[in-house]
Image: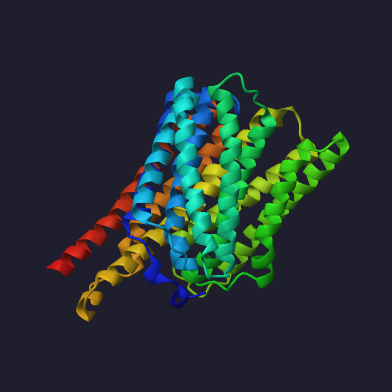
Amino acid sequence: MDRAALSLEQAPPLAVPARFFLTAPLFGVAAAVLALWSGPALLASRWTPALLGATHLLTLGFVAMVMVGALFQLLPVLGGARWRRPYPFSVAVHLLLTAGTLLLAAGFSAGCTYCTQMALPLLATGLTLFIGLALAALRGSPSQHASVKAMGYAVTGLGMTLLLGLYVGASHGWTALPATRAYTDLHLSWGLLGWVGLLGVGVAYQVVPMFQMTPEYPAALRRWLVPGLFAALLLLSVAPVLPGQYAVTVLRTVAEVGLAAGFVLFAVWTLYVQARRRRRLPDITLWFWRLAMLCLLAGALLWAARQLYGGAWGEVRYPLLLGMLLIPGFAVSIVSGMLYKILPFLVWLHLQTHAGSREARRRIPNTKAIIPDRRARPQFVLHALALLLLTGAALWPYLLLWPAALTFAAACGLLWLNLLYGLRTYRAVLRGFDA
């Protein structure tokens, strides 16, 4: 699908996705500040209150914030779907998601039961509103492109993540409810793989060939990969409730192997098509996507090593290291790469709609000039360095946690400044039109 096939006239106002995009990096800074405040004790285990708070600041505040904002824009443009009153609904979803995430992080990290009890209704309302609007828009979409279908699976994955998360969160806010690690692990699996992973795969089908000038993904992969991964997640979810320990173990292993193999296939094929791209100029988005794919592959290898060897070391350090590879490594990297293409493209698109003459259109900068590489490149270097330090901190927290958190805060702060620069470019060009 090329740009000519996009439904550009369906695009909502730029303010709809921009508020989500500008908020997200600030949550990354907040997660880093929480890590600095907690110190190396943050990484004593995956269950420390501060780590749970920092994790949700990243997954809800950074990653989900960007992805929700992107879907408000991508569903109309890629799928021709019509949102009902996107501006007021986006404001409501943004406010509820922001407030709910802050309260939930405070509830976890500070042990504030009242904060958790307030956070859950806010998050439930905001995300349910978004899921309902997105599924209604998808139902009315005329597009049969694989990216649009993958978005439907991903939004459903978000719904599963929300249901499991509400139960797990309620067990923290209301101690009468029993909490089990099985539900926590399923919540994490659906959030990282069923929501972030499936949406990343679906967006890649469109964004990688269009913006990075690569060959298309194979038709068979576009048709079957996302449904296969979704089916494996369903199998992983029903396995614990089946009778017989042996059957549970077998089905769980089959589901986990299927998920690992599917995401490895996606990562390897993405690196393959990127190696065959037609445009050989340096590209920041390409670097972020390659870093994300390498982290995804490293996570799969780490999981395989854990299954083969296990050991006492893996009880504490394995989940921390895997979390670093999949959350700041895969999820934050792929979202950052998307931002550096989607925001400049949206700025260019909306400037085109406001330009009233051929002379005005000649004043519109190209997408590479809206956020120049000279601004984006240092941010990528900081992000890659922070990721290296974070993975090291999972093994040696007393040595590397503080430099890792400081570097990650700097990377998120610079990302926020770069996004702000792109939006200021938009306003400056608009003022030129008026003049």
Q: Position of residue 110 (x, y in %)?
A: 46, 21
Specify how the rendered protein is coloured: rainbow
The quarter of the picture where residue 354 lies is bottom left
Query: Closer to the camera, 383 or 346?
Result: 346
Query: x, y percentage for residue 60?
Result: 48, 41
Looking at the rendering, in which quadrant would you find the C terminus?
bottom left
**Residue 295 visible to the viewer:** no
**Location of residue 109 with respect to 146 vertically, above or below:** above
Seen as rendered, the residue at the extreme bottom is 358
Look at the image and tell me whether residue 234 can be seen.
yes
- Kindly indicate the quadrant of the structure image that contains residue 371: bottom left
- Who is closer to the viewer here, 293 or 209? 209
Residue for point 47% across, 46% down:
129
Q: Nearer the viewer, residue 171 or 282?
A: 171
> Residue 98: x, y in percent?
40, 39
Image-quadrant location for residue 204:
bottom right
Judge from the rendering whether residue 125 lies leftward or rightward of residue 12; answer left or right. right
